[in-house]
Image (tube, grey):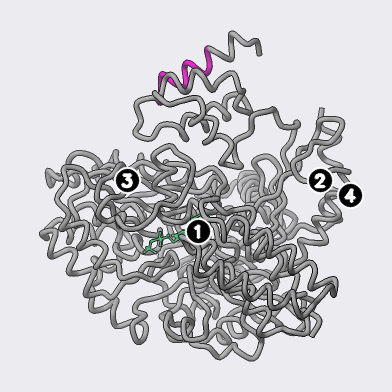
Amino acid sequence: MTRVFVPGDATACALGADAVAAAIAEQARARGLDIELVRNGSRGLFWLEPLVEVETATGRVAYGPVTPADIGSLFDSGLLTGGRHPLALGPTEQIPYLRDQTRVNFARAGVIDPLSIADYQRHDGFAGLAKALTMTGQQAVDVVKASGLRGRGGAAFPAGIKWQTVLDAPADQKYIVCNADEGDSGTFADRLLLEADPLQLIEGMTIAGLAVGATQGYIYVRSEYSRAFAVLRAAIALAREAGFLGPDICGSGRAFELEARLGAGAYICGEETALLESLEGRRGLVRAKPPLPAVQGLFGQPTVINNVLTLASVAAIFARGAAWYAGLGCGRSLGTLPMQLAGNIKRGGLVELPFGRTLRELIEDFGGGTASGRPVRAVQVGGPLGAYLSADELDIVLDYEAFAARRAMLGHGGVVVFDDSVDMAEQARFAMEFCVAESCGKCTPCRIGSTRGVEVIDRIRAGTAREQNLILLRELCDTMEFGSLCAMGGLTPMPVRSALDKFPQDFGA
Amino acid sequence: MGSEQIDLRIAAVLEQLRDLPGALLPVLHEIQHELGHIPPEAVPAIARALNLSRAEVHGVISFYTHFRTTPAGEHVLQVCRAEACQASGSRTLEAHVKARLGIDYGATTADGKVTLEPVYCLGNCACGPSVQLDDTLHARMTPQAFDALLADLEVKP
Ligand SMILES: Cc1cc2nc3c(=O)[nH]c(=O)nc-3n(C[C@H](O)[C@H](O)[C@H](O)COP(=O)(O)O)c2cc1C
Ligand code: SF4
C-alpha cells in the first residue's frame, strides 16, 4: 500500500487541497490501486500548495501545485512510483527552499500525520518529555536557561528566567498558558504548528508543567483559527488517551491537564495580561504590571505564559540538549527562528533558520522577490506594530539586537513584502486605524491618540497645513509611546515613524 | 425556533459549561454556535448561572467582535484588511466587494443573503488576499474570483 500525502492545513485547503484529496481517492478507487491517503499538515512551502507527496522506495517525492484536473495525468504518469510529470518536484527534502532551512520547530511539519501518536514518536516525539520526567524542577528550568531560549511571541524575554520565577513562587496551583492568539498580520507559524504538529506543543507544555510544578495548562487560540483549534483539541484527546496527559503522565505518578480555549476576535488579547483576563471570562483589558503573571497570573496564581513556538521549542531542547540548541544562532539570539514570508512575495511560506542570516537572503533567495515582479519598496517585519524597512536596509541581520538597534523589531518573525506601488502614508494611516480598532481603551493616548493620528495623517495626505501636521504627528507618536500602558499604544508609533523617516516623499515632501 | 426552545438550549449550554473556570467565553461561544447569535434575552440567564452582573455579561459580549447579538445574514463574508493582504491587492478587492454587495462593513445585503465583516488576519498571509465565506477560507482572491463565488451563492436554495 502506498502512502500519499495531501496537506490539510488552512492555506492548502484554501488553495483547493480537499478537492485534490477527493480526486486522488476517486482515481485510486477507479484504477483499483491500494493507497493510504494521509492528510498531513503542510511543509509550509505555501507557493507550491496543494503539494502532493508520495512515499516511494527511495523516499518521499513531491508534485505541486496540483489541481483536481491534474490527477488523471498524474496517475497516468505513475504517481504512485514517483513517475515523471510536469508538476514533479523530485525528492521533497531536496527542494532548495526546504533543503536550505534548519528545521527544529517545523522538522515534523508536513512529514507526519498530525493526529498520529505513532508517527510523532517515530520522529523523536516525546523523547524530551521522557528526559524531563527524570529531572527535578530546578534541573529542568536550568536546561531552558542553558538553551538561551527567548520568547518567540514578540518581546524576546528569556524563557528560563520566567520559568524560574514561577518555580520559586510558592502556590498550591500554578498554570501554564500558551499564547496562540497570533494576531500579527504576516504570521502563520503558530497556526501551522498547531495544524501540522500539535503534539509538539502538548509535549512542550507538559515539560513546562513538570518544570515549574503546574498541573493545569490552557491554550488560548484565536477564533479565526477554527481549523487549528479543532486539530489541537483532537490531539489533546489523543495524548490523554495515550497517557501523555492526565493524572499519571507516562506512569510517573505526576499530573498535567490541558484545555484549549477560543478567543473571540480581539487583537489585544494577544497581550499576555489581556489574554489572562479573557481566559478568566472578562473583557480583554490590559492589566498593570507588576504583579508579573509569573507571580500573579491566571486566577491570581503563578503562571508561565509563553508563545506557541517558545513552548514547542522546549520539546526539542529537552530531546536534543540545551547545548545543541544554543549552538544554533548568534550573539544573544540563540536557536532558530521560524520566519514567515508573506504579502507580495513570489515564494511565500515558512522559513525556519538559525538567527544570523539576513533579511535579503530570506526575501531574495528563499522568497524570489515580489509576486508582482516589481521592485521591493518596503518590508514590514514583526507584525502591525513593527517598523517598515526600506529596500536598502535588506542586509540587516536576523537577530533581536540588530533589529532593535535600527528601531525595528523581529517580533514573531512575520515578514510582509510590499512592491513599489505601495503608498506609505496610507500604511501609516492604517497603523493608526488598526490601533483605533484594537485598543482595549484603558489609556487615553492609545484610545484617543490613535483616532487623532488618523485625522492628522488624512490632513497631511490632503496637503492641509502639512508642516504643522507633520510636527503634530511626531508629537502624537511621542505621547502614545510614553503614555501607553502596553505595546499596543506604545509601539503603534514604530510603523508610523519608520514610514515618515524612510518614505518622506509619500507624505508630500 | 420559539423562545421557549431558545431558553431550553441556553439552559442546556449553561448546565454543561457553568463549572468551567472562567466559563463565560466558552458559554458565549457555545450559545452563538447553537443559535447563530447571542440573543439579549440570554443575558440574565447567563448572569445568574455564572454569578455575574448583567452589565458584566453585556460588557464582555460587546467587547469581542466575534460575538453578535442579532442574527447574521444567510452567509457571513469576512474580508481580510490587514497588511499582508494589503500588499497583495486587498484594497482593490475590498472596494470591489463593497460595490458588488452594495454595503459597507457591518451590514447585510437587503435580501438577507450576505453579512460583510472586516477581519484582521486569517493566517493565510503567504497566499493573500484572503476572504472567509462562512467556514471556508479562500486564498489569492481576485475581483473575478469573488464574482464567481457570489454567483455560486445565488444559485443555492
Ligand atoms: C498588542 C500585543 C499583542 C500581542 N500579541 C501576541 C500574540 O498574538 N502572540 C504572542 O505569543 N504574544 C503576543 N504578544 C506578546 C505577549 O504579551 C507576551 O509577551 C508573550 O505571550 C510572552 O510569551 P513569550 O515570552 O514566549 O514570547 C502581544 C503583545 C502585545 C502588546
Ligand atoms: S496602550 Fe492601548 S491597548 Fe494597551 S493598555 Fe493602553 S489602551 Fe489598552
Q: Earlier in the sequence, mark 3 or mark 1?
A: 1
Q: Which of marks 4 and 2 is nearer the N terminus?
A: 4
Q: How far apart are marks 4 and 2 (CA)?
A: 9 Å
Q: How far apart are marks 3 and 1 (CA)?
A: 26 Å
Residue A298 disc label: 3
Whether marks 4 and 1 lie on the same chain: no
Question: Which quadrant, please, contains the C terminus of chain A?
Answer: bottom right
Q: Inspect the image, locate mark 4, and give the three-letter code of the amino acid beneath it.
A: Ala
Binning the other alpha carbons within 10 Å of mark 1 as few (below 14), some (14 to 19) or many (20 upward) gives many
Residue B99 disc label: 4
Residue at mark 4: chain: B
Which mark is in front, 4 or 2? 2
Q: Distance between the residues labelled 2 and 1?
A: 32 Å
Q: Distance between the residues labelled 4 and 3?
A: 46 Å
Give the labeled residue for mark 2. B104
Q: Residue at x 82, y 54 (%)?
A: B145
Towards the viewer: A382 or A49: A382
Residue extent of the magenta highlight = B8-17
x then y, percent, for residue A404: 47, 81
